[in-house]
Amino acid sequence: QIQLQQSGPGLVKPSQTLSLTCAISGDSVSSNSAAWNWIRQSPSRGLEWLGRTYQRSKWYNDYAVSVKSRITINPDTSKNQFSLQLNSVTPEDTAVYYCARGKDEYFYYWGQGTLVTVSS
Amino acid sequence: DIQMTQSPSSVSASVGDRVTITCRASQGISSWLAWYQQKPGKAPKLLISAASSLQSGVPSRFSGSGSGTDFTLTISSLQPEDFATYYCQQANSFPPTFGGGTKVEIK
């Protein structure tokens, strides 16, 4: 049974960095058939895919153009988890953030979601 | 990016009703389409992949059809637990994109 458990703060100040972690059980972040994604949801932007990390012969990352200059997704093989960092946040980054396991570009398993509010 | 447009944005229905939700892609995506169900405060749940392939454990009253640009999710006999918001998502082209959602409400 694959499970994803998110952790991280729910309040971030403007211009600071949003950091979330997604711990994986029942699978490996190093899986050569899965990709590990971050997706966010807000009333104004709906469901928005942000990026992913995955390993094939080496590690790869893909990011959405809308956040590409501000985002980093890193795997942590020692803890079997992956993380999201989003720099220079503004109130427009307020959303529920989800981690998700993807395969063939479908999202089969999701974390529980973390509401992140950007406010001073 | 491929734009996904769902209609209607909301539908009111009664238990036992047949409900149909439509999703249109801004360009052809073959059968690379998923449907998700989301209940308040919960993450989306994958119901259907590849336009019509029902995920394990999903009731057979859910079905999906279509290819190219036009797709349909049908709930043949609406049950109380089906009141939720439904999203389509294209998996044909990077980046993956989602529709705006259809809320199925109790009449």
Image: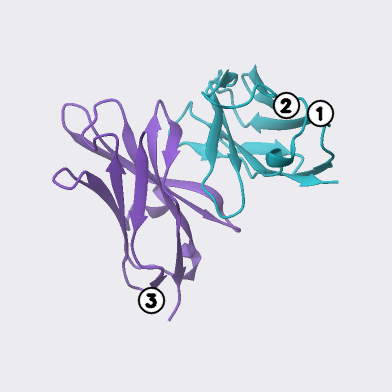
Q: Earlier in the sequence, mark 1 or mark 2?
A: 1
The quadrant of the picture occupied by the N terminus of chain A is top left
Picture quarter with the C terminus of chain A: bottom left
* Residue A68: x %, y % from top left: 35, 51
The chain that hosts pointer 2 is B
Q: How many marks?
A: 3
Please state which of the two labelled residues, at mark 3 or mark 2, is closer to the viewer. Answer: 2
- At label 1, counting other C-alpha atoms closer than 10 Å, the crowd grade (few under 14, some 14-19, many 20 or more) is some
Quarter holding residue B11: top right
Mark 3 vs mark 1, CA separation in Å: 47 Å
Q: Which chain is purple?
A: A
In the rendered image of this protein, which colour is used for chain B? cyan
Name the secondary structure under disc 1: loop
- Camera-side mark, 3 or 1: 1
Query: Is the Cβ of the residue at disc 3 closer than 8 Å to that at disc 1?
Result: no
Choose top left, top right, bottom left or bottom right for residue B69. Answer: top right
Residue B37 % position (x, y): 60, 39
Q: Write the residue at 34% across / 68% down.
A: A88
SS at circle 3: loop
On residue B18, the disc is 1
Label 3: few (<14), some (14–19) or many (≥20) C-alpha neighbours in 10 Å: some
Residue located beneath label 3 in the image: A13
